[in-house]
Amino acid sequence: MKVVARRDVTGELRACNKQAGPTAAANYAGHLQTIARPVAAMTATYPNESTSTRHSHRRDQFILQIAGVTAMMTERGHFVVPPGHGLWIPAGVVHQSRAWGEVEAQTIYVTPDRRRETSETCRLIRASSLVEALMDEAVRMPQTYDQDGRDGKLLELLLTEIAGMPEVTLHVEVPPDPRLAEICKAVLGDPSSDLTLDDWADKCSLSRRTLTRLFRRETGQSFSVWRQRVRLLEALARLGAGEPVTCVALDVGYDSPSAFAAMFKRELGAAPRHYLRWTDQEVVLR
């Protein structure tokens, strides 16, 4: 894992733990929670399939994906973050990430008092060119930037621009009902599982009818549609990391590449082999 800290607390350029172990980014992120400015920034790279621990931050976090794909799990939902997209995670929200492909990301940590109204929940956005340019500026600023000068004004503009970006629907929600949450987390952990709704009803000591009603009430979807969405998001992450379509199709639970391709095209309007050609475009799940 490589962590590039653009400047330390004295404002001098330095490289931080360029070839350090897996805790380097977490340690530096912890340091950024305490600096005497409302916004702190860092750039980091993560190797393919690296996974963070479950954690939260005292500050709000915005992660802009530069390269690779990040799968982000929270208590209330699972997000896939492709290049050119950003994920806002409010302070205190427990989350865990996994890298698909060699991931590079820019991150800012923001004190909650600077939060905009639209940033009170996890939000995935497609970053505008202005957001990308302002994030580039943020990671180059000294940590003790002038809040009343150019740097402070650019960061305020960045927060306003992030809050105004429309949300992208590359995520699935985990319902608060503990019985359903257990099912959802199990499926997220193993999207290829072929356990049926009847199997889950038995495990939860519920009737199929009750579980069906609960699932639709809490998620707005049937169990089969929700699981298909999970499999699609897993496939998007792995295709974004460059894995072959056939391997992805079988690993996420489809009997054949053709069945997977039919589902993929039905949901996203393009065949899986074309996915890498339009990952820089907005993807909307219908």
Image (cartoon, helix red, strand yellow):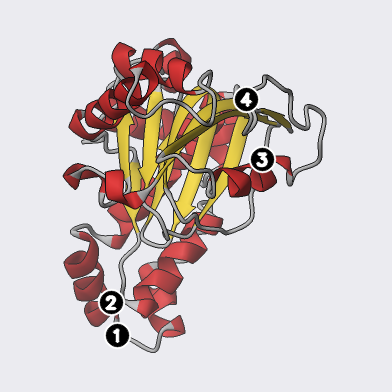
**Sequence-first disc among 2 and 4:** 4
Mark 4–mark 1 Cα distance, whole angstroms, equals 58 Å
Q: Secondary structure at mark 4?
A: loop
Question: In terms of image quadrants, where is residue 13?
Answer: top right
- Estimate how packed mark 3 is, as few (under 14), some (14 to 19) or many (20 or more) residues with alpha carbons within 10 Å: many
Residue 244 seen from this side: yes
Residue at left 39%, top 31%? 86
Amino acid at dot 1: Ser
Mark 3–mark 4 Cα distance, whole angstroms, equals 15 Å
User: Who is closer to the viewer here, 280 or 57?
Assistant: 57
Quarter of the figure that contains the C terminus: top left
| Residue carrying label 3 | 25
Question: In terms of image quadrants, where is residue 98?
Answer: top right
Residue 58, placed above or below residue 86:
below
Is 103 on the left-hand or right-hand side of 155? right
Amino acid at dot 2: Leu
Amino acid at dot 4: Arg
Q: Which mark is residue 7?
A: 4
Residue 254 seen from this side: no
| Residue carrying label 2 | 211
Q: Nearer the viewer, mark 1 or mark 2?
A: 2
| Residue carrying label 1 | 207
x then y, percent, for residue 266: 27, 30
**Sequence-first disc among 3 and 4:** 4
Mark 3–mark 1 Cα distance, whole angstroms, equals 46 Å
